[in-house]
């Protein structure tokens, strides 16, 4: 079986796909991965022996400017990605038996599959983009709302119109060029009626949250056996477990001055800090020896040895910390991050810092909750419920989809 996997998005979109690719390879499949041509993504895929097929622009070129992308940027990027998918995926899918897409609205992926006559699967890492009569577009599932079901349906219709405005013209122009009929609703066309949810049921329950027939596989986790760097290992051994602070691929979205705020809040609690540089290029605030800076590192190993994890609330980081039993402080910034922050608080495995601009005092208070013995105990208990076989479950299902073509 030959599978083509594709995404366009940050590390949190690419690493799960690498986890699925590794599981497919383990079952004897041939795998191709089309993803943004960022160097770190190519390095990530090289760990499992899969070359990256470049798709579209680098993510860093889009999100790592001095300011977050604007609406005008989105309207420029959307047709560029549609064109890239038609061109790149058509070539990469040659000889493949199935195409699976995830990441930023993969308009063009189902169309290439349709043109080539192979099955298409859409996967997502949360339920926020799935139409529902229970919650508004972009709102956290389960959030109380004064609006009735009719209002929600109107808002979801408007959401579909928003997606059409971004992708519709470009998509239908490329479809017409290969003899395919136009699509009226791009969002529902891409999502299909049976999307896969690559998230752990304990962290992201899906039952009853959408009218779609969701297939929940569990999170796609790429096993990481890399040793921690010698300097980090020495730092960990030199004292009590530190607090990890990192904002991943947030770049311009990271809170202003977060390194200073976090270090000072941790010091006020008598805690050392492991500061993850990330795309925001976080750096030490002085030369004291209670703060150690790391680059890309094995989070699975590191999170088992820290007192708490302060992060932005990406699906991957939230899952990694939960699986390691590390209490969390989530400072959400965009997209699905408020959802993960709320789930961490609801489960009692940490604190949600919903103000996007932490102060030393506010982060100190959130860390006090996360570092409490009862939070640590609860995080340890929940860790035992997080499944690690989601990628294998999805890989086996993909074999079944390919066989049923």
Image: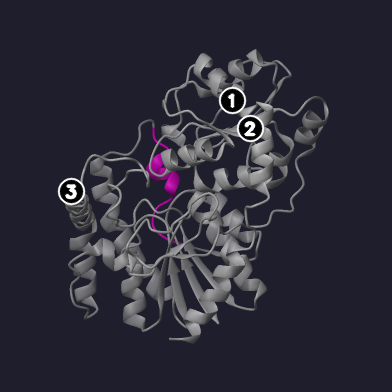
In the rendered view of the protein, which quadrant contains the N terminus?
bottom right
Q: SS for tag 1?
A: helix
Confirm whether residue 248 shows in the render: no
Residue extent of the magenta highlight: 54-65
Indicate yes or no whether the magenta region holds residue 282. no
Residue sitting nearer the eye, 10 or 330: 330
Disc 1 crowd rating (10 Å Cα; few below 14, some 14-19, many 20+) is many
Q: SS for tag 3?
A: helix
| CB contact under 8 Å: marks 2 and 1 | yes
Which of the marked residues, 3 or 1, is nearer the chain's N terminus? 3
> Would you name the residue on which mark 3 appears?
151
Find residue 174 and report its horizontal and vertical position in percent: 23, 70
- The label on residue 369 is 1
- The label on residue 375 is 2
Find residue 249 and report its horizontal and vertical position in percent: 49, 41
Disc 3 crowd rating (10 Å Cα; few below 14, some 14-19, many 20+) is some
Q: Separation of disc 2 and disc 1 at Cα?
A: 7 Å
Which of the marked residues, 2 or 3, is nearer the chain's N terminus? 3
| Looking at the image, residue 220 lies above or below residue 306 | below
- The label on residue 359 is none
């Amino acid at each position: 079986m030959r599978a083509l996997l594709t995404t366009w998005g940050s590390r949190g979109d690419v690493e799960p796909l690498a986890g699925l690719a590794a599981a497919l390879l383990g079952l004897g499949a041939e795998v191709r991965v089309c993803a943004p041509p960022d160097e770190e993504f190519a390095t990530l895929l090289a760990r499992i022996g899969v070359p990256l097929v470049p798709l579209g622009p680098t993510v860093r070129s889009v999100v790592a400017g001095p300011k977050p992308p604007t609406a005008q940027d989105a309207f420029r990027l959307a047709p560029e990605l549609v064109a890239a998918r038609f061109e790149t995926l058509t070539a990469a899918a040659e000889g493949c038996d199935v195409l699976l897409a995830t990441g930023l609205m993969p308009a063009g992926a189902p169309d290439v599959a349709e043109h080539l006559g192979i099955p298409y699967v859409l996967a997502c890492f949360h339920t926020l983009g799935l139409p529902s009569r229970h919650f508004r577009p972009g709102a956290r599932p389960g959030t109380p709302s004064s609006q009735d079901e009719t209002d929600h349906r109107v808002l979801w219709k408007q959401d579909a119109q928003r997606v059409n405005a971004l992708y519709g013209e470009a998509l239908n122009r490329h479809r017409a060029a290969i003899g395919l009929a136009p699509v009226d609703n791009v969002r529902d066309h891409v999502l299909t009626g049976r999307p896969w949810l690559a998230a752990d049921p304990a962290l992201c329950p899906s039952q009853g949250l959408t009218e779609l027939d969701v297939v929940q596989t569990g999170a796609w986790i790429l096993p990481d056996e890399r040793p921690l760097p010698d300097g980090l290992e020495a730092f960990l051994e030199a004292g009590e477990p530190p607090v990890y602070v990192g904002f991943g691929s947030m770049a311009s979205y990271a809170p202003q001055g977060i390194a200073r705020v976090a270090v000072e809040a941790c010091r006020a609690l008598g805690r050392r800090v492991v500061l993850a540089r990330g795309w925001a290029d976080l750096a030490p605030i002085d030369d004291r020896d209670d703060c150690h800076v790391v680059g890309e590192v094995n989070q699975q190993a590191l999170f088992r040895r820290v007192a708490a994890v302060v992060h932005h609330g990406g699906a991957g980081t939230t899952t990694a910390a939960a699986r390691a039993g590390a209490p969390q402080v989530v400072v959400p910034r965009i997209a699905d991050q408020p959802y993960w922050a709320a789930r961490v608080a609801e489960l009692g495995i940490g604190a949600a810092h919903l103000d996007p601009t932490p102060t030393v005092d506010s982060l100190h208070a959130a860390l006090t909750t996360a570092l409490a013995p009862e939070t640590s105990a609860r995080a340890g208990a929940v860790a035992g419920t997080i499944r690690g076989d989601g990628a294998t479950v999805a890989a086996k299902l993909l074999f079944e989809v390919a066989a049923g073509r």
